[in-house]
Amino acid sequence: MKKLIGVGISVFCLTLAGTFLYPLGCSETQPVQKSVQANPAPPTGEAGQAGFLIQISAGAQDLGAAAFGQNPLTITQGTAVTWENTDTVEHIITSDNAVWNPLTMMPGEIGTFTFSDLGNFPYHCSLHPSMTGTIQVVAPSDGT
Ligand SMILES: [Cu+2]
């Protein structure tokens, strides 16, 4: 004559196991936060190619060709160029040959154009015609 008390023991064991396992689920790992502050990143051009940032200096209207942070600028084909207006007045970056639509930038604003064609691209500010710049677009070197 045997009394089966196995079921009762099993339930007890499961409860016990749950109690012991509970603390294990509590361990937390704090992820290390990496904070990298960089200058405003220019947008990424086509094919994942990095862009280039040209800052328009304060007082740009009196600076002529020096109004633009990089001038003349040589880039490889497909690069996106972003102008950032760090001045206190509006500027309108205009292609001499109407290659792109004029980029109107109030102070603090940016404008971007991706250069897909080779060649020299002179530009100016249509509000301050003495502000002139040139971008030269060259073929990416393929190492052959
Ligand atoms: Cu201007």
Image (spheres, grey):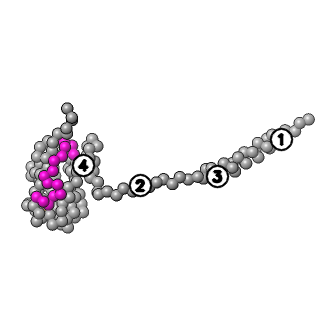
**Lower sequence index among marks 1 and 4:** 1
Determine which of the numbered discs, if any, sits on residue 34 in the image: 2
Picture quarter with the C terminus: top left
Of the two numbered discs 1 and 2 in the rendering, the one whose residue sits closer to the viewer: 2
Looking at the picture, does residue 7 appear above or below residue 129? above
Of the two numbered discs 1 and 4 in the rendering, the one whose residue sits closer to the viewer: 4
Three-letter code, disc 1: Ile
Is residue 126 on the magenta stretch?
A: no
Crowd tier of the residue under label 2, counting other residues whose Cα lies within 10 Å: few below 14, some 14–19, many 20 or above: few
Which residue does the numbered mark 4 point to in the structure image?
Answer: 51
The response on whether ligand 1 sits within 8 Å of label 2 is no
Task: For marks 3 and 1, give the CA distance.
Answer: 29 Å
Of the two numbered discs 3 and 1 in the rendering, the one whose residue sits closer to the viewer: 3
**Lower sequence index among marks 1 and 2:** 1
Crowd tier of the residue under label 3, counting other residues whose Cα lies within 10 Å: few below 14, some 14–19, many 20 or above: few
Which residue does the numbered mark 1 point to in the structure image?
Answer: 5
Q: Which of 75 and 128 is in front in this view?
A: 75
Please tell me which residue is depicted at 36% across the width and 56% down the height of the picture.
36
Counting from the top left corner in percent of width and height, residue 143 is at 21, 35
Q: Is mark 4 on a helix, strand or loop?
A: loop
